[in-house]
Amino acid sequence: MSSNTPLAEILRPKTLDEVLGQEHLTGKNGTIRKMLENDTLNSLILWGPPGTGKTTLAEIVSEKSGRKFYKLSAVSSGVKDVRDVIEEAKKQNLFSGKSPILFIDEIHRFNKSQQDSLLHAVEKGWIVLIGATTENPSFEVVSALLSRSQVYVLKSLSYEKLAELAELSLTK
């Protein structure tokens, strides 16, 4: 990596074992690790404070599951973008047999109709949705979408994990 690469990018985990502070999800008995080991990936909502690894975790899940990864930001995307990805995902699904992952960052910023535009594709299995939010999904994600997803809470890093990260930064 070049000297202009941000430290956060240099330190970004590439595997579940490198993810700090989320052992309840990524550790030996973590639910996301088990889901990947058993190849039973379902739609998920990752809920946690900024900087806890929601996007990184979605990318690792995609890589480990061998699925194509589409990424949208609810801040800059609309229903047309969602529909375009779903159409592409349907084609992809025909060839690989594995539903691609559609990651939506800040899914809580999508309005009801934007969130509703995801329902059919999730129900049909055309996509595996991974939504990331800093807001309580019980209040910010429509109930129909929430009922078709598993919600996982990411924790803020403890002081011990922050110290571990600081040590790691000195070796990279």
Image (cartoon, helix red, strand yellow):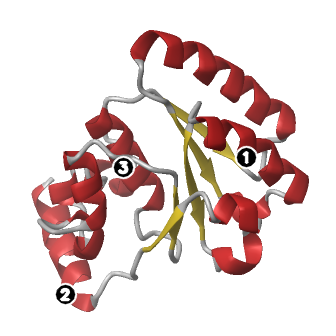
Instruction: Indicate the quadrant containing the N terminus: top left, top right, bottom left or bottom right.
Output: top left
**Percent x, y of residue 69:** 48, 32
Tell me the distance, in whole angstroms, between the alpha carbons under discs 3 and 2.
21 Å
Say what secondary structure mark 3 lies in.
helix
At horizontal 53% and vertical 16% (from top left) the residue drawn is 92
Does residue 85 appear to the left or right of 46 in the view shown? Answer: right
Seen as rendered, the residue at the extreme bottom is 159
Disc sitting over residue 9 in the figure: 3
Percent position of residue 57, x then y: 37, 54
Bin the neighbour count of mark 2 within 10 Å (Cα to Cα): few under 14, some 14-19, many 20 and up.
few
Whether residue 84 sits left or right of residue 157 in the image: it is: right
> Could you tell me if the residues under marks 2 and 1 are in contact, i.e. CB atoms within 8 Å?
no
Viewer can see residue 21: no
Furthest residue in direction front, as rendered: 124
Q: Which mark is residue 160?
A: 2
Residue 19 in which image quadrant? bottom left
Q: What's under tag 2, amino acid-wise?
A: Glu
In this rendering, the label closer to the viewer, 3 or 2: 2
Question: Mark 1 touching mark 3, by CB under 8 A?
Answer: no
Mark seen at residue 119 = 1
Q: Amino acid at mark 3?
A: Glu
Residue at the farthest top position: 95
Q: Amino acid at mark 1?
A: Leu
Chain-order first, disc 2 or disc 1 = 1
